[in-house]
Image (cartoon, coloured by chain):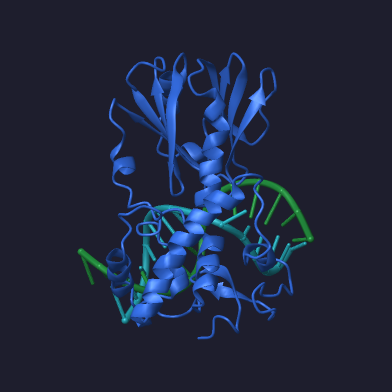
Chain colours: A blue, B cyan, C green
DNA sequence: GTGCTTGTTGGCCA
DNA sequence: GTGGCCAACAAGCA
């Protein structure tokens, strides 16, 4: 489920344990989630330290590692949840499960990174400054730096690609995943196969507005209990024979941009 | 057994 | 070099 809102909610799961000393680290050394990471250095960076603070941006999370909450960080841990990765907080003494590839054991609780399919990733950056991959992330979609002209420039550059594929490009739409892309296009009444370069000014304006709307709303509305309003496309999109919550028309599901895509053939006419 | 899955990457080709 | 497409990665489920 990891798209923008779920990543932020995942980050909050570990929040109660920030500042608590990590007494012991257990991890699955050969697991693919540590590809490109030196697990011995990860372990030594974490053991005896605390997670000082955390942040989420799009699908990325970062945790600052320091000797104590008052000290400057000496390392940073990045976590990407991939397809189905998740974070958990276990009570002290609870044993990590088969798919819990990283466990940070504290005095009061254990922090877990779980990932059945191994598409997720844990990376380490050593140093006091946050890593460049974090600092160089594209503008947050709900912020003022994500401007109309930034969107326009990108749609022009990717003019022949279908809108669905373009919205999934993290370099411009950090945090947008498969369902959010469908939700945005459904709200903007744009067909997912529509070429990015073919939008009128008014349609570009609508798309820009709905990108921001869906990002803001997903953070606000999903947060209390991880549920999705029935007025959204999302709860209707997976079941066979789902109907458009706006007009009642039967929804279409086909592969667009390499992903299963759902849209309303009436509201989103080509 | 088959075919599907909320993500990313590298290789191929125009 | 850039843009667009697609298979591969892994594991579980229907």
Q: At which x and y percent is residue A213?
A: 48, 61
Q: Reply above or below: B12 against A191.
A: above
Q: At which x and y percent is residue A203?
A: 40, 78
Q: At which x and y percent is residue A113?
A: 57, 34
Q: At which x and y percent is residue A118?
A: 56, 44
**Towards the viewer: A221 or C1:** A221
Q: Reply above or below: A66 against A172.
A: above
Q: Residue at (70%, 75%) from the top-left corner?
A: A243
User: From where the camera sits, is residue A245 visible?
Assistant: yes
User: From where the camera sits, is residue A28 visible?
Assistant: no
The answer to which image quadrant residue B4 occupies is bottom right
Q: Reply above or below: A243 against A228.
A: below
Q: Reply above or below: A46 against A192.
A: above
Q: Residue at (59%, 30%) from the top-left corner?
A: A112
Q: Residue at (53%, 61%) from the top-left corner?
A: A180
For the image, the number of numbered tags is 0
Side (left or right) of A90 relative to A79: right
**Towards the viewer: A76 or A224:** A224
């Amino acid at each position: 489920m990891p798209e923008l809102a779920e990543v932020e909610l995942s980050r909050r799961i570990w929040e109660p344990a920030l500042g608590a000393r990590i007494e012991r680290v257990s991890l699955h050394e050969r697991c693919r989630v540590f590809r490109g990471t030196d697990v011995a250095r990860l372990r030594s960076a974490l053991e005896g330290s605390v997670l000082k603070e955390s942040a989420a941006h799009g699908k990325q999370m970062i945790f600052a590692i320091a000797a104590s909450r008052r000290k400057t960080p000496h390392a940073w841990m990045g976590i990407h949840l991939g397809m189905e990765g998740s974070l958990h907080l276990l009570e002290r003494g609870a044993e990590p499960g088969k798919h819990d590839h990283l466990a940070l054991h504290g005095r009061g609780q254990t922090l877990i990174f779980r990932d059945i399919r191994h598409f997720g990733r844990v990376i380490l950056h050593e140093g006091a400054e946050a890593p460049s991959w974090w600092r160089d992330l594209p503008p947050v979609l709900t912020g003022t730096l994500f401007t109309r002209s930034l969107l326009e420039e990108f749609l022009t550059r990717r003019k022949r690609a279908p809108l669905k594929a373009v919205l999934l490009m993290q370099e411009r739409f950090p945090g947008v995943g498969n369902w959010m892309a469908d939700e945005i296009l459904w709200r903007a009444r744009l067909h997912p196969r529509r070429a990015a370069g073919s939008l009128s000014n008014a349609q570009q304006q609508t798309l820009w507005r709905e990108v921001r709307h869906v990002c803001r709303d997903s953070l606000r509305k999903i947060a209390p209990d991880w549920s999705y309003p029935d007025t959204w496309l999302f709860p209707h999109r997976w079941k066979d024979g789902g109907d458009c919550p706006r007009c009642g028309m039967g929804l279409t599901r086909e592969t667009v941009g390499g992903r299963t895509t759902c849209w309303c053939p009436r509201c989103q006419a080509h």
